[in-house]
Amino acid sequence: MNYYSRMIAWLLVSMAISMVLTYFFGLFIGLAMSIGVFILLSMYIRKKALRGAVSSGGMFGGGINYVCIACGHRFKGGSCPRCGSKMRRAEF
């Protein structure tokens, strides 16, 4: 399942829960409970997505790698260890 179909599925589940709550508890209490369910469901989805991002390395764990423009060698910093060139391109 791709991202958009998964979000549509969660939205439909949230709407179904909201309709059932409104049917059983009336308009005002059901609406308040529906908003609470929607917020809790959103927090759960966000936590689940962040857990997946952290376990795969996240955005801030790798540091900056450089690629030499002259020879194409990848290295961490400074000048290119292969050819000595200081012209480099950053890769994140």
Image: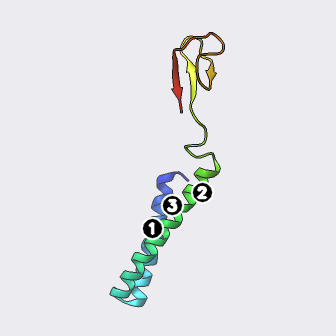
Within the image, what quadrant is residue 21 found in?
Answer: bottom left
* Residue 13 spot, x, y in % from top left: 48, 70
- Name the amino acid type tagged 1: Leu
Measure how far apart labels 3 and 1 are at the Cα level. Answer: 17 Å
Quick one: SS at disc 1?
A: helix
* Label pair 3/1, CB-CB below 8 angstroms: no
Measure how far apart labels 2 and 1 are at the Cα level. Answer: 23 Å
Foreground of the two, 83 or 7: 83
* Label pair 2/3, CB-CB below 8 angstroms: no
Residue 17 lies left or right of residue 26; in this view the side is right
- Name the amino acid type tagged 3: Arg
Q: Give me the residue at 62% from left, 45% from top.
A: 57
* Residue 72 spot, x, y in % from top left: 59, 16
Camera-near label (3 vs 1) is 3
- Disc 3 crowd rating (10 Å Cα; few below 14, some 14-19, many 20+) is few
- Name the amino acid type tagged 2: Arg
Q: Earlier in the sequence, mark 2 or mark 3?
A: 3
* Label pair 2/1, CB-CB below 8 angstroms: no
Q: Earlier in the sequence, mark 2 or mark 1?
A: 1
Within the image, what quadrant is residue 26 found in?
Answer: bottom left
Q: How many marks?
A: 3
Residue behind mark 1: 12
In the rendered structure, find residue 46 and report the number of the disc placed on it.
Answer: 3
> Extreme front residue here?
78
Residue 23 lies left or right of residue 40; in this view the side is left
In the rendered structure, find residue 30 and report the number of the disc placed on it.
Answer: none
Residue behind mark 2: 51
